[in-house]
Structures are given as C-alpha cells and as structure tokens.
Amino acid sequence: MRENPERGAWVVLLSAFAVFCLLAVGIPLGARAYMQNAEDEQTAIVESLIGTVVVELPVGSGPQPLTRGNSMTVPEGTLIYVDETSEAVVTFFDHSFMRLFSGAAVRLERLRAPRFPSSPLPTTVHLSLLAGRIRIGTALSATAPLEMLVSTLYGEAELAEDGSYAVEVGNDLAEIIAYRGYADVSAQGQQVRVQPRERTQIAPGQAPELPVGVARNLIANGEFQEPLAEWRIYNDQGTDGGEVDGVAELVVDEGRQAVRLVRTGAGGNHCETILEQTVDAAIPDPATSLVVRATVKVRHQALSGGGYLASEYPLMIRITYRDVYDSEAEWVQGFYYQNINNNPTTFGLQIPRDRWFLFESDNLLESLSISPYRIIRVRVYASGWDYDSLISDINLIVE
C-alpha cells in the first residue's frame, strides 16, 4: 500500500462501501426478522370451581393446593391436577378457556403470543391432556390467528377459533367432540376433520375413526348379544321369606334376540330377577337430550298393576344417577298389561299383552326436576310374584 497508495485507498473505500451495503440491507432485514418471529410468553389463570385443585408450577416449591373460589396465575409448563371431587376452570390470555372435570390432568405446554402486531405468527395455546375430560371454548382472535392444539397419548387435535369442544382420554381411547367450530384430529399420519355436532375416537396405535354424530348410547350391549358379560344377573328375594328364584335367559322371540325374565310357583312371595350394568359415566356438557329407548313385552303377571305399592311391575327399568348437587336419585319406568285389582300404577305404563312394544321416554334432562350429572347404573328387572317378560334392547341415548 505504501508503494501504491492510490490502490490502497480504493481497497479501503470499496471495503467500507461493502460494509455499508451489508449494514444497510442487513439491519432492516434483521429488524424485520426479529419483529416477525419475536414471541412473548403468556400466562393463564387457574380457578377452583369445586374442591381442591393441585397446581404444579414448572419451577417452584412443588405441588400447590388451590381451594374452591381461589385463583392463581400460572405460566406455560404448569401441570394441573383435578381429583374425583374437584373441578377447575382455566382462562387463557386470549380469552379462550378450559374447564377441567373430575379426574382430569392437563399440562400447559405452550402459551405464546407474537410480540409485534405485524408478525405473521399465531397466538399459540398448546395443551397436553394426560387423563380425564376437558371442555374448551376458543376465542375469536382480533389480531393474530389462534393455534389451539390439544395433544393426548393417542393423537392430537387442532381446534378452530370461536368454537366449543370436548376432549376425553380414558385407559384405551381418546375422544374429540366439536359442538361449535371444527377440529382437525391427527394420529398415525392420518387426519380427519370433525365438524359441528360430530365426534371421533382414537384407539392406541390407530388412525382417527371417521366422524359420527354426537349422540351415543351409554349402555354397553344393550341389544343383549351373547355373551352378557357387561350385565350382572341375580335375584333379590326381599324380606318375605321366598325361596323360588326367577330365571334370566337369552331367547329368540318372533325373530328378535331378547332376554326373558320368568318366574313360576311363587306362592305369593316377592322376588326380583335383575339384569344390572354399572355405567358410571358423566353426562357430556353441554348435553341437550337424554332419552331411554327399549323394546319390551309382558306375557304374564300375577300381581295387578304395580302391586300394592306401585313397586312390583312384571317388567321395570331403573336408572340410578347423581345430580348436580351430588345426591343420588332414580328414574323408574314400569310396564304392565292388567290391573284388575286397581292397584296404584305410579311410574307405570300399560301396554298390550304379549306384543312387542317400542318405548321411548321423555327427555330426562327436561322432565326430571334436577338434571342428572352422572349415570351410576341401569337395571332391567321383573318384580312381583309370578311373571314372564322380555326385553330385546335398551338404550340410554345422550346428545
């Protein structure tokens, strides 16, 4: 450069110009990239609705109890446990919310929002449902689009904005329901879209099932197909000293598979021949309809009507449930064909003798004074002295 100062000057000048160009282009590009990709961690508010909720922060002093009526602001990474006596609600930063029902466990994996309004990044709420049932209401975003993702052990669901959804994880199944909006459900490399009033299920190692309507039957093997593994069959002799049991047997009557409940030789002693199934299922929230449907037949009854106390019909259906106040109650429907002695027939329905009858109840969510919250068990049974009755199907349909 000393020998040729002019040349050195040009080198310095061109180098400076190159640096200037890099800075002139790089700084705006860097600033733009930063503004497009910068995110802020957000928080959520956990509130106990019923009982005590356990909240475990990602960094802290371990699990913390949250009693009824109290709330806590939590960051992403928080784990929320709700036991069998508790419920909680989580309100997210974008006004979406989640309700945790009894037995649920959820981790808040990611709560992020773009730092700048010009960013193309979505508002992200990522959850992991470890167990139990949750309801989610997604907000309609006025700024960044919402990316609400719920992951389970069996698959994941991306929920659309301005929607209402339910997600439940059991021991061997995950179920996703869309009441409003739609959900894209993925598992094993396959995806289905669940439209409003539809649901899908994911079994371990399987792709999502094709969506179906939200209506479902809470009773397993309500068509009484062989074997009757889901049903417990037994007799209850009561307290009048009777010893003659009734019989429950699978038969085919007029081309219909059915269970026949028959007892003869009673001698005026009471007995109940019972098919019982433990359901132990919560009524989905929201639910608009709960209906009992059954196909029944009564061939013979020794007692008139429903017996002396309207409690001994030759065929009965009894639904045991818990209401929203956690009190146990029952819905009862009896069937008979004659009442020559004018016995009381409360909760009874007279049907033609020895003919198949299609029964459908009123909407129990409207007809019962206090709506059911959880179905405990279902009983189909014959009661009284001598009886001969059949039932070919029973369904408890919730929608």
Image: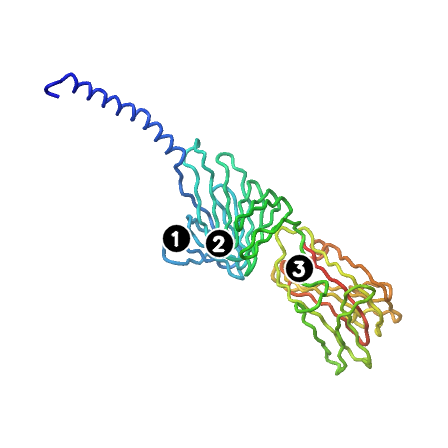
Is residue 80 shown above or below 23? Answer: below
- Alpha carbon separation for disc pair 3 and 2: 25 Å
The N terminus is located in which quarter? top left
Q: Residue 106 appears at what percent x and percent y? A: 48, 54
Splitting the image into 4 quarters, where does residue 79 fall?
A: bottom left
Q: Residue furthest top?
A: 6
- Of label 1 and label 2, which has the lower sequence position? 1
Colour logic: rainbow
Q: Residue 171 appears at what percent x and percent y? A: 54, 61
| Along the line of sight, the residue nearer the viewer: 122 or 250 | 250
Mark 1 crowd level (few <14, some 14–19, many ≥20, 10 Å Cα): some
Q: Amino acid at mark 1?
A: Pro
| Along the line of sight, the residue nearer the viewer: 237 or 15 | 15
| Along the line of sight, the residue nearer the viewer: 51 or 258 | 258
Q: Which mark is residue 106?
A: 2
Identify the residue under disc 3: 218
Task: Give the side of residue 241 with respect to residue 169, left or right.
Answer: right
Q: Residue 163 appears at what percent x and percent y? A: 58, 43
Identify the residue under disc 1: 58
- Alpha carbon separation for disc pair 1 and 2: 13 Å
Q: Amino acid at mark 3?
A: Leu
